[in-house]
Image (cartoon, rainbow, N blue to C red):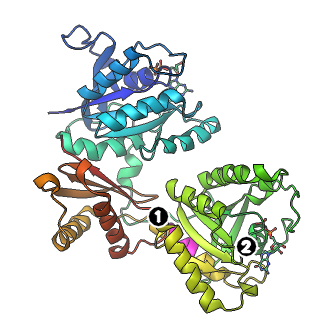
Amino acid sequence: MSFTLAIVGRPNVGKSTLFNRLVGKRLALVDDQPGVTRDLREGAARLADLRFTVIDTAGLEEVTDYSLQGRMRRLTERAVDMADICLFMIDARVGVTPSDLVFADILRKRSAHVILAANKAEGAAAEAGVIEAYSLGLGEPVRLSAEHGEGLNDLYTQLMPLADGFAERAKSDAPDVDVDLSEAEAEDPDAVPMPNDAKPLQVAVVGRPNAGKSTLINQILGEDRLLTGPEAGITRDAISLRTDWAGPEGTPVPMRIFDTAGMRKKAKVQEKLEKLSVSDGLRAVKFAEVVVVLLDAEIPFEQQDLRIADLAEREGRAVVIAVNKWDIEGDRQAKLKELKESFERLLPQLRGAPLVTVSAKTGRGMDRLHGAIMRAYEVWNRRISTAQLNRWLSGMMEAHPPPAPQGKRIKLRYMTQAKTRPPGFVVMCSHPDKVPDSYNRYLVNGLRLDFDMPGTPIRLWMRGQS
Ligand code: GDP
Ligand code: GDP
């Protein structure tokens, strides 16, 4: 038995291009089969060791009035109903359009298993669109370039745990779709890729204006390379700076630091400020592996701080909260307690992220910050073995069995880590749509505690078997 993957999305996003790539020369048109409309193409697909049927909703024309015409909707619904898994494709160069929202809606209602793909993702023009794709609420998008055959590796990574539930995977022959899985296979499961000169650790320092970002970056760089000052309106264009930051152990760590201060200070009109800072933040967060959210101890957890921290979490970055201007703080004990309470209350999605106090001006706490960044990075890359996870899962189920909505006991069968950076886990289970959020949280919090993973977003997906 194999599974069926439907590629859906509005016209021109690249569905047929992907279809052709997956099917290669083995294209079998079955469009005159009863019950299949002529507009659905079906083919036998291969992706590395996976064998499956792929359906493409070809032959659609662009709908001009921003509402999906009935035919398009019906065709999509039919494809979705025929499929075990849906690959929803958007055009990353265009971003999310109103039609895309209609598709997302259909998929949310009709399909248990959706993989989101942002196609045409080659090159910088696609970055904003890829980020926008997260707003569809369908999880992390796979960056694809169907035309150039890029991202198939990531597609495989998302497909594989789902496919495992549907089908025996072909054990035989070598992949004849051009996917390079050698890197993934050769990877030492316990190795954390350490930053080096070729790939310095990418750190973004984000926060509201005057939090002290420039001062902090100067402190890290150890020289007065950036301007600092309280006046708004100073324009600085420093976007990223390469440095070797030696931590308490003295070993210099190659880093690239993204500065958002410069761009922000160009904003003259106050009302524009928040908008601008969020999109600047977006840009920096997108490049970063670790995001340092810098707060001003005097005015911590402002709306803007919360938005950017939430964004970093949604983008799946490792997050460190740094509270600046600690030098002018009076009652530090009380303040710290208050900060931790606010943190728990206002950013529950970042529970466990390190909160460190620093003074960018005097340099106090810089070692702590360095340590927190390195640790967050390590956790972000963490890989846990399937054996360990499944032992852990049985323990968790014993301690607190999953509920039985309407008398149907939810069975969690198997768990595996599907990805790192950030860590993402898949649980194969019966009735995945019935697993309450509270049970999901129980598992995520458990993972965080038991495998000691503070300061990183943890993704957990429930997948069904049919
Ligand atoms: P469909 O209508 O969704 O099936 O889209 P097509 O597969 O027909 O592709 C529409 C257009 O986008 C074609 O001109 C393709 O060559 C182009 N296209 C498809 N994939 C990519 C890609 O990854 N990058 C770029 N730049 N163009 C692509
Ligand atoms: P940015 O807008 O986030 O880049 O903030 P700046 O680095 O320009 O700093 C804004 C103001 O806060 C400047 O007047 C800095 O001197 C001051 N400042 C920055 N860090 C500290 C700190 O650790 N302690 C104190 N007391 N002031 C600081």
Quadrant hosting residue 219: bottom right
Q: In the image, what residue occupies the spot 76% across and 86% down?
A: 328
In this rendering, the answer to whether 255 lies above or below 141 is below
Picture quarter with the C terminus: top left
Q: Which mark is residue 349?
A: 1
Q: In the image, what residue occupies the spot 31% across and 63% down?
A: 438
Q: Amino acid at mark 1?
A: Gln
Q: Which residue is mark 2?
A: 220
Q: In the image, what residue occupies the spot 61% across and 41% down?
A: 128
Residue 288 showing in the rendered view: yes
Please, what secondary structure does the residue beneath circle 1 have?
Answer: helix
Circle 1: is it few (<14), some (14-19), or many (20+) Cα within 10 Å?
some
Q: Please identify the residue farthest to the left as the structure is shown.
A: 407
Q: Amino acid at mark 2?
A: Ile
Q: CA distance from mark 1 to mark 2?
A: 28 Å
Give the extent of the magenta segment.
372-377
